[in-house]
């Protein structure tokens, strides 16, 4: 199609109020998904923190994807949602794939609807700019910019990429410019992988499928559940009746003595 025809098409779309949908910025992706990203602490049998990293919620019933090397280091796990501080939640192991450095955990606390990321049905594209979320160093939830270097290097369990990661980024979700997760951080333990390569979602999705666990791409269900929650209206207050009833009760108990005219006005004997 010629440039002139494209110009005409976009001009027409602008006239009728239709604009091309831009990709989501890294900040928008962070804001949209902060409630789906977990700071995870691995604890030993004494309750001491022995490791920490990132994970992300993939279903409304609280299933979480993270790295196997984090899950292998702990007897129990604590998680905080979207921050290093705040309320702690408990995680339990549900499955793992050692070769793919992939683990499935689940939040044990019952809730009507955990916020979940949206999983992309597609592989990331060659030279695509991606956004990772994690908890590097002592920071809160932070953004890391990544570029998929070359799809010709695509491996079964990891993707070649370039990025700047720190230890606690490991397990963090990686988003495309539509805000959908295409991989996660943590390929450094895989044979042949480099520290900045990404773990494919395929092994994690396979673990979920084998155990009858599913991911969700419909956050609106949570929003709809909340919107449809029954609301019991409060009865309207009638202050005049309340005052009158209080006065009558006070008179009955001898706490207030009313004059003759007041009694006649209130139809009291």
Image (tube, rainbow, N blue to C red):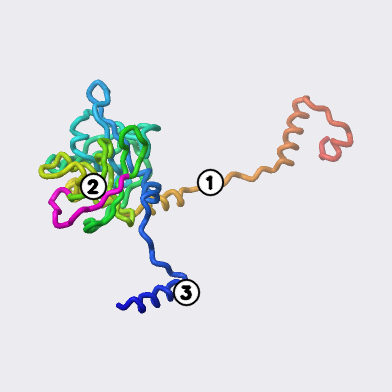
- The Cα atoms of the two marked residues, 3 and 1, are separated by 46 Å
Farthest left residue in view: 191
User: Residue placed at 20% from the left, 40% from the top?
Assistant: 103
Magenta span has 231?
no
Crowding at label 1, few (<14), some or many (≥20) Cα neighbours within 10 Å? few
212 on left or right of 243: left
Which of discs 3 and 1 lies nearer the camera? The answer is: 3
Q: Quadrant of the N terminus?
A: bottom left
SS under mark 1: loop
Farthest top residue in view: 46
**Residue 182 visible, this orientation:** yes
User: Residue placed at 73% from the left, 36% from the top?
Assistant: 245
Please tell me the numbered disc located at residue 213.
2
In the rendered view, tell whether residue 187 sits above or below residue 176. Answer: above
* Residue beneath disc 3: 15
Magenta span has 148?
yes
| Residue placed most toward the observer, 244 or 60 | 60
Q: Which residues are magenta?
A: 144-158
**Residue 106 visible, this orientation:** no
* Residue beneath disc 1: 232
Q: Earlier in the sequence, mark 2 or mark 3?
A: 3
């Amino acid at each position: 199609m010629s440039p002139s025809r494209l110009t005409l098409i976009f001009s027409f779309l602008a006239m009728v109020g239709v604009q091309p949908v831009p990709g989501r910025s890294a900040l928008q992706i962070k804001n949209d998904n902060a409630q789906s990203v977990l700071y995870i602490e691995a604890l030993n049998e004494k309750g001491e923190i022995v490791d920490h990293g990132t994970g992300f919620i993939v279903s409304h019933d609280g299933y979480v994807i993270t790295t196997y090397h984090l899950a292998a280091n702990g007897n129990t796990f604590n998680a905080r949602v979207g921050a290093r501080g705040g309320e702690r939640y408990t995680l339990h192991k549900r499955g793992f794939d050692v070769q793919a450095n992939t683990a499935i955990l689940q939040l044990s606390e019952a809730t009507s609807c955990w916020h979940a990321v949206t999983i992309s049905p597609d592989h990331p594209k060659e030279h695509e700019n991606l956004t990772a979320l994690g908890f590097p160093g002592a920071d809160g939830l932070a953004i890391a910019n990544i570029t998929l270097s070359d799809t010709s290097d695509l491996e079964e369990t990891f993707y070649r990429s370039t990025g700047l990661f720190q230890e606690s980024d490991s397990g963090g979700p990686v988003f495309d410019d539509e805000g959908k997760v295409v991989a996660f951080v943590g390929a450094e333990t895989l044979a042949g992988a480099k520290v900045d390569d990404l773990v494919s979602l395929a092994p994690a999705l396979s673990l979920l499928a084998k155990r009858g666990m599913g991911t969700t791409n419909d956050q609106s269900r949570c929003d709809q559940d909340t919107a449809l929650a029954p609301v019991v209206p409060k009865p309207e207050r009638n202050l005049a009746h309340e005052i009158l009833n209080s006065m009558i009760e006070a008179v009955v108990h001898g706490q207030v003595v009313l004059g003759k005219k007041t009694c006649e006005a209130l139809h009291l004997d």
